[in-house]
Image (spheres, helix red, strand yellow):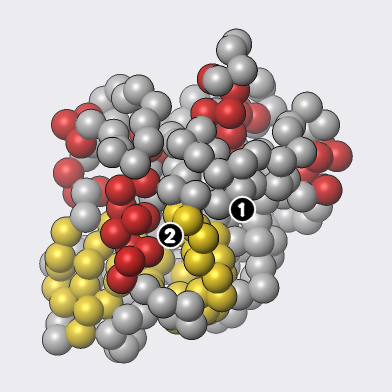
Amino acid sequence: MSARVIPALLAGLLACGSASAGPLVLTPANSQAPAPAQQVAAPSPNLGGGFIEMLFGGLGRGPVQPYYSSAPEPYGVEGSDPRNMDPRFLPQEVAYEGREAAGTIIINTPERMLYLVEGQGRAMRYGIGVGRPGFTWAGVHTVTAKREWPDWTPPDDMLKRRPDLPRHMEGGPENPLGARAMYLGSTLYRIHGSNEPWTIGTAVSSGCIRMRNEDVIDLYERVKVGTKVVVL
């Protein structure tokens, strides 16, 4: 496996800490009500895992079933070929009848959707990738930092489990954090881009919320530090 391919497979290795808060309810007007969300504590210190661990046999659960007909070629800011993607995971404006104020981000884990409440009964909806079983979580945080083409440094706990991982990766198209990252509270959770767009709509991460690069760039421009983030 070439040196360029290996970094492109690291998106599933993002380290994400634990968080807790009571689950809330979100029911977009034009979609079915999701199953009740269950708060599941992310195990500690098992902060690694994800797509690359699956490739090397670490998960033992077989390949992830994505909502893409085939995996497109790796890409940069321009994004993947949307013809291979279930159209319901593409960004779109939808009706919203919830109670959250305009500007709030709502992440509906069972739906694998992220909503940005616009007000006046509308919201922008984006398809996302979520934590794999055992790494999902629910809670309320705020965006505490924003980064363009962020660097990635695996935490010590992950390196203990996977000493073959790079100790640091500079930001760029092959970085698993993608084009943008929004950091949530004091946790290691992030909303970030991905160099594996075919994983959108799947449960494969270690708890972070991943988006297509072009979608996370759009969201990044719409939100500010201090934005409320509700994870169901």
Pick the front one: 118 or 230: 118
Q: Mark 2: which secondary structure? A: loop
Q: Is residue 96 visible?
A: no
Above or below 105: residue 34: above
Who's the residue at 69% across and 28% down the image?
Answer: 58
On the image, the x and y values in percent for residue 114 come to 34, 62
Q: Residue at x 36, y 46 (%)?
A: 213
**Residue depicted at 50% across the width and 66% down the height:** 146
Q: Which residue is mark 1?
A: 135
Image disc number at residue 100: none
- Give the crowd class for mark 1: few <14, some 14-19, many >=20 residues within 10 Å: many
Residue for badge 2: 109
Measured as percent of width and height from the top left, residue 84 is found at 22, 30
Residues at marks 2 and 1, CA–CA distance in whole angstroms: 11 Å
Q: Amino acid at mark 1?
A: Phe
Q: Quadrant of the N terminus?
A: top right
Identify which amino acid the numbered label 2 is placed on: Thr
Residue 144 drawn above or below residue 46: below
Does residue 68 appear left or right of residue 162 in this picture?
left
Quick check: 52 left or right of 45? Answer: left
| Quarter-of-image position of residue 189 | bottom right
Image quarter of the C terminus: bottom left
Please provide percent x and percent y for residue 148.
Answer: 47, 56
Say if 187 sits above or below 51 in the image: below
Where disc 1 sits, the SS reads loop
CB contact under 8 Å: marks 2 and 1: no
